[in-house]
Image (cartoon, helix red, strand yellow):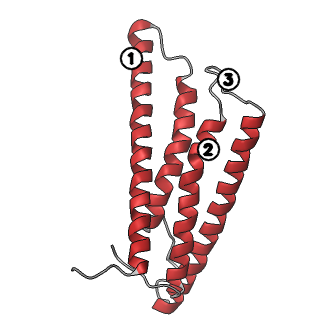
Amino acid sequence: MNQKLTSTARVDHFLQRLCDASATIGGIVLVAIACVTVVSVVGRAFFSHPILGDVELVQLGCAVVVASFLPYTQFRHANIIVDFFTTGASEQTQSKLDAFGTLLYTLVMALVAWRVAIGGVDIKANQETSMLMALPLWIPYMLMVPGLVLCTVIGFVQTLQHLGLIAKENV
């Protein structure tokens, strides 16, 4: 196993590391959201004093969490697929359909990443803030962009792999 990694394996390994980092960040944000929720509920129940704007924090944090977990899910081929109609199809047909599905997913992710980035820029320019805590709304938008872009890159690589244009490597 002292072989030098091929360029495709290096790309897959690099994408895997980025996915792991993105998921770790998402996990940290998720734990922070859970802590805010617990503190707010305890404050409301025992002290009649919840965290003002806790729902805002949870909503904004959840958007970042989802965008952070998407690349990991895509990299692991863990998205839900419906293969009822393709069960009897040949492996080549299934691979082409998987390539088409992955390409559609990639295009949608690219569109979402682009619109979230544009939305974040517009929100910053308009100085929009959350209602209760007056948090700048552009921050969670921009925190979503790296995960969405990474998801797009992974989808592009996987589309090429399904088409056989680059080799599939297991790292």
Q: Residues within 10 Å of mark 1 (few under 14, many from 20)?
A: some
Seen as rendered, the residue at the extreme left is 1
Image position, residue 88 (x, y; %):
47, 88
Taking the image as shown, residue 101 lies to the left or right of residue 4, namely right
Q: Which mark is residue 145?
A: none
Residue designated by label 2? 142
Determine whether 84 is above or below 25 in the image.
Answer: below
Determine whether 123 is above or below 39 in the image.
Answer: below
Taking the image as shown, residue 45 lies to the left or right of residue 104, namely left
Q: Residues within 10 Å of mark 3 (few under 14, many from 20)?
A: few
Distance from disc 1 to disc 2, alpha carbons, whole Å, reads 31 Å
Distance from disc 2 to disc 3, alpha carbons, whole Å, reads 19 Å
Quadrant of residue 96 in the image?
Answer: bottom right
Q: Which mark is residue 42?
A: 1
Determine whether 45 is above or below 28 in the image.
Answer: above
Tell me the amino acid under the disc marked 1. Val
Give whichever of 94, 5 is nearer the camera.
Answer: 5
Comparing labels 1 and 2, the label whose residue is closer to the camera: 2
User: Which residue is at a point 38% across and 81% down the rendered structure image?
Assistant: 6
Q: Quadrant of the C terminus?
A: bottom left
Q: Quadrant of the N terminus?
A: bottom left
Tell me the amino acid under the disc marked 2. Met
Comparing labels 1 and 3, the label whose residue is closer to the camera: 3
Q: Which mark is residue 131?
A: 3
Say whether disc 1 or disc 2 marks the residue closer to the N-terminus. 1
Image position, residue 94 (x, y; %):
51, 85
Helix, strand, or loop for circle 1?
helix
Distance from disc 1 to disc 3, alpha carbons, whole Å, reads 23 Å
Image position, residue 65 (x, y; %):
49, 44
Determine whether 72 is above or below 39 in the image.
Answer: below
Q: Residues within 10 Å of mark 2 (few under 14, many from 20)?
A: some
Give whichever of 108, 23 is nearer the camera.
Answer: 23
